[in-house]
Amino acid sequence: MKALSPSRIGWSAVIVLLVSMALASLAPPGEVSGAGEDVRFLDLTLLVSQEYPVNWPDIFPYFHINHYLKIGPRGPYNSDIITIDENTGTQFDSPAHGPVPREIAKITPEKVPVWQFLGEACVIDVRPLLDDAPIGHSPLIRKQHVVDWEQRHRPLGPGDVVLFRSGYNDKYFKPLPEGLGFVAQVAAGEKTAWPGPDAETMDYVGSRGVLTAGIDSPSMDRFRPPGAMETHGAGLKYGMLWTEGARNLDQLPATGAVYLQLPPKHGGGIGAEVRAFGIVGEPLAPWLIERARKHRVIDLSVQLSEDLPVWWPGPGAGNSRYRYYQHVLPLPYIPAQHQRAYDSHVGTHLVPPAYALPREGFDPGGYSPQVREWLSEYEKSYGPRGFSDITTEKVPLSQTAGWARVIDVKHLIGSTSESDWPASPVIRAEDIREYEKRSGELKPGELVIFHSGYSDVYLKPYPEDKACMADPLNGKREGWPAPGAEAIRYLADRGIRCVATDGPTLGGVDPKNAVMTYWALGSRGLVGVEYLTRVGSMPPKSYFIFAAPRLEGAHGGSAERLRFIKRGPDQGELHKGRFATLAGESRYSTSKWMISVKS
């Protein structure tokens, strides 16, 4: 096996945004054996859309998505510029957000321990408080509400996630202009505010050892001074973090469900957008809860930073994607509030079907002559490319979760000739079959991760950043290993629905191979997760979870976290792929998809 050489490795394709997290068990999970009910993934996140009230009015900049790259003569991919601040839609507050001791204030989003983003949901029903206060004020969630819940269920403790359910977001989060009743009319003194816990309540929750909480309203703090920031300080001083803007908490039982909030791994700031969701069903949910309590979690995310190579530079000049950047908003009463802008394919990210597949009705004559030639060659070999309108928010959470099969492809490094650069070593179907001979056949619903070690070696800050992507794209070194269309079709035939890599992209640096790889992914109903790191730290048997923010119409996923957990003997019973949407449960079938992914 050849070692990674700084002169031989590169990158290709595009970038999306997502973070990764993993749960890793160190002991055989005997308690997960045996059949059980279907596992369900429950989406608890507000849709981030320019048509909804996702921003605080008159304080922070509006959320904006610019579909600046479209399939056509300029290229075969769709991509977007996302402009978003830390208090948009469903988001989380890190301990750095609020009046807290200096050491606690240093815990910015990327420094939060990965295990703290999940735990057992403890849903405290406070619906009788909804709208029960004077205009412009919040009904108060008191300590006694928490104590009463404990008396009915059990004492709270470490590993629990306290969720306050009032139903406020379910009632008032609506498309504009009706959605002005969500926050704007409250701020204008025209309606009653959301229920919120007072400082004593959050101090009590923190004293019980609870380090994660959430609420289905715009803020954990009650509205109007002197409540402003008092609740934040009372909870965050413990190193607590929480979700604001959750939704549909009525889908969760009072106890027994897994709650997850997966934020981008932004460097600095006070918080970030999240994908909040629950997992219910035996035996997976209790098993995940136990692993989370034991901190058996591994972070596989690439950190997002302006000085790291996390966005697509493109070959030459003038072909880059929109870079990642953030700046501090001038708000003296909130510490280090950030606005961020980035291409939807930055860092660790999701590749949804509509990234490379056009909408139905697209005329192939709209491609450049070169891409038309590639399409003709592709369809002669593999059949119709297909169409898709499946953007990021439409990809089921269950499709990017499951038992991971890590395929080592480091033996391919150094297999290209310098005269052929820019080029990436191609992962072929034969490489996958050889893996199956050694490790057992792939099974439907599993996730395949290609492990080259590339990001571990080449993800470095300026001035060493060019070695990661720019040099391979410009033919100065070999690109990272990447699957061809043949390998993707083989995986699809094995029932695989999600493919991941620790290289920057699944397409590699050669543009022809890349676009065919993404056409193959989409046309066969697969999605991709790109730019993982530390894959070598995963236990042999790991459960993988990945989720992208619910950004309406986005063609990539914004840095959410992935998780893994050690696998049990009856892993097939743990995850049967049923998915529950905001509107209710529905079975997901890839047979309805005509979709694709990217370069």
Image (cartoon, rainbow, N blue to C red):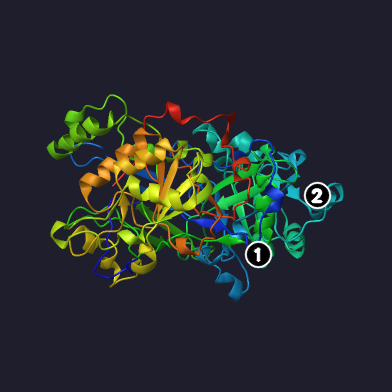
> Which label lies toward us, 2 or 1?
2
- The disc, 2 or 1, on the residue closer to the chain's N-terminal end is 2
Q: Where in the figure is residue 430, as x and y percent of width and height?
A: 34, 47
Q: Where in the figure is residue 270, as x and y percent of width and height?
A: 52, 62
Q: Is residue 398 found left or right of 266 in the rendered image? A: right
Alpha carbons under labels 2 and 1: distance apart: 20 Å
Looking at the rendered structure, the kind of residue marked 2 is: His
Q: Quadrant of residue 10?
A: bottom left
Circle 2: is it few (<14), some (14-19), or many (20+) Cα within 10 Å? some
Query: On the rendered image, what quadrant is the N terminus found in?
Result: bottom left
Looking at the rendered structure, the kind of residue marked 1 is: Gly
**Which residue occupies the extreme front position in the image?**
437
**Which residue occupies the extreme bottom position in the image?**
103
Residue denoted by label 2 = 145
Q: Quadrant of residue 179?
A: top right
Q: Where in the figure is residue 561, as x and y percent of width and height?
A: 51, 54
Q: Is residue 129 found left or right of 51 in the rendered image? A: right
Q: Tag 2, which secondary structure?
A: helix
Q: Where in the figure is residue 83, as x and y percent of width and height?
A: 39, 50
Query: Does the CB distance between marks 2 and 1 fall below 8 Å?
Result: no
Residue sitting at x 54%, y 63%: 333
Residue denoted by label 1 = 233
Residue sitting at x 39%, y 50%: 434
Q: Tag 1, which secondary structure?
A: helix
Residue 162 in view (yes/no): no
